[in-house]
Image (spheres, grey):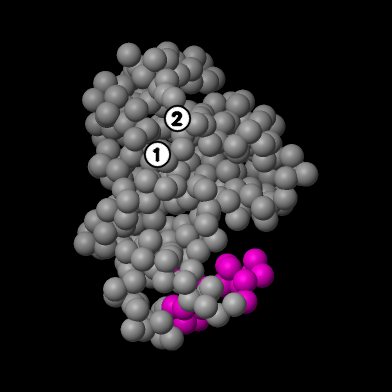
Amino acid sequence: MSLSIAKDSVIPTESLHTDKKIVFDTKDLNLWYGDTHALKDINLSVYEKEVTAIIGPSGCGKSTYLKTLNRMVELVPTVSTSGVITYNDREILNKNFKAEELRTNVGMVFQKPNPFPKSIYDNIAYGPKIHGIRNKKVLDEIVEKSLRGAYIWDEVKDRLKENAYGLSGGQQQRICIARTLAIEPDVILMDEPTSALDPKSTHKIEDLIQELKQDYSIIIVTHNMQQAARISDRTAFFLNGEVIEYDKTDTIFTNPSDQRTEDYISGRFG
């Protein structure tokens, strides 16, 4: 059984019912860049220790929604919002919830690898140091654990003092994932994390995402529908700032409820 589609919202039916805890719950979210209405009545629940994919054509609001979940979108001066987003039952758009605290729990990996112009070690230790950890032994343990968590320890363990820029693109992206893991987040947001990578590196990142979901909730924006089908548990289809359909990934790709979803997945537009 799949979704009933209302005009401005998506109402989950039996196929989305789960005993899993809701990590992010978005209700009636609207977002404007000045006079431009970028997100329209978004209703979406994200569950713990799953991969949630967000697909849709360019300019449909995917990345805007992702950046709303850690309030990075507030860095744009003209942004205004209405509606509610809760993270572990706390209202994140409430100014009493400090953005810095939110971003400690909700890490972000960007489209292009963006390591700091520092050593591999200092890239990973940066976040823990910001949070007051100075003990060398503790930092060493965090660095190793994070690099192992990103499945890159064996490739860089003898190069920790070297500049991270000397690594390949795929390695740099895994360093960025390790840097995110070092602050022990609860959720990892990924905005097109493999779009700048070759197929081999993409495969490694996808394998890594499958491992990471054992311990983290992951929300990934991707233009690659095959990738969404391969790695996600649930998929949301965005179009013109709206959620057209949200369901288990198998349902979205094999039995979508909305003709627009089927048209997009089959390549008729986008």
Residue 259 position, x and y percent, is 33, 20
Counting labels gives 2
Q: Please provide percent x and percent y for residue 88.
A: 60, 37
Nearer-the-camera pick, 192 or 155: 155
Front position in the image: 267 or 251: 251
Q: Name the residue rendered at 21%, 62% in the picture.
A: 200
Choose the circle earlier in sequence order: 2 or 1.
2
- Residue 26 rendering spot, x and y as whole percentages: 58, 31
Q: Please, which residue is most extreme toward the front here?
A: 137
For residue 78, the mark is none
Q: Residue at the spot x=69%, y=32% of the render?
A: 82
Looking at numbered disc 2 in the image, what kind of residue is underneath it?
Lys
Q: Secondary structure at mark 1?
A: loop
| Disc on res. 50 | 1
Q: Quadrant of residue 33?
A: top right
The magenta-colored residue range is 114-134
The residue closer to the viewer here, 170 or 257, is: 170
Q: Nearer the viewer, mark 2 or mark 1?
A: 2
Q: Which residue is mark 2?
A: 20
Q: Where on the picture, by quarter, is residue 236?
A: top left
